[in-house]
Image: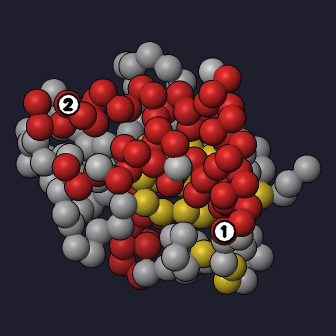
Amino acid sequence: MQSHHLAVYTFNQFIAPYQSDAVKGFRDAEPGAFAEMERANGFIARSGYEGEEGPMSWGPQVFPKCWENSNGDGWAPSTLSVWETIEALMAATYHGHHGDAYRQGSKWHLARPGVPEYVLWWIPAGHQPDWTEAVSRFEDLMDNGPNVRAFSFKKAFAPDGQTVKPDAARVKAIARENGALADIA
């Protein structure tokens, strides 16, 4: 059994309110992307959102200090999930239905120089991070750059604090396995 799992928090801001036509493509892609991610190899769990169907929320949802309610709807796209490995997360992020949506992100999200789109950090196996912990890690990455507490795919760390480079061949193999799972579903 693994002693650590990888937590990931994603955050962005929409170009318009969530219910607007400008982000309809995001709304249309979201259910399929969530379903595919949840079936992906290496996926452990994800937080839901208070008051919505689906998984339970891992505490009250909060947003980072860089968030501006510029659309007036009090909402920003963010996720919190746990994975077995960095390669499993990369395979699910950059391939399949989610990968297709990810490549269209600039249609729906504001460009925010100096604000990361996500943060990664290691947690003890069995630990369930909450939204406050996730935002703290995100702000650490935003304020201090990649470090053992808060990092990215480009500059990643192992649970022991050593820098690591994700195994690209393993990412591709997992993506192929996930594609086979999607064909079955």
Q: Position of residue 32 (x, y in %)?
A: 45, 28
Q: Amino acid at mark 1?
A: Ala
Q: Name the one closer to the observer, 129 or 170.
A: 170
From the image, tell me which residue sits under label 2. Answer: 24
Q: Is residue 38 left or right of residue 41?
A: left
Residue, x 19% and y 49% (percent of image)? 107
From the image, tell me which residue sits under label 1. Answer: 168
Secondary structure beneath label 1 = helix
- Is residue 131 among what the camera can see? no
Residue, x 48% and y 63% (percent of image)? 119
Q: Position of residue 135 (x, y in %)?
A: 42, 56
Secondary structure beneath label 2 = helix
Residue, x 35% and y 67% (percent of image)? 116
Q: Position of residue 82 (x, y in %)?
A: 63, 46
Q: Are marks 1 and 2 in contact (CB under 8 Å)?
A: no
Q: Judge whether 164 appears above or below 77 on screen.
A: below
Q: Is residue 147 left or right of residue 32?
A: right
Q: Name the one closer to the observer, 185 or 8.
A: 185
* Figure quadrant of the C terminus: top right
Question: Which mark is first along the chain, 2 or 1?
Answer: 2
Q: CA distance from mark 1 to mark 2?
A: 33 Å
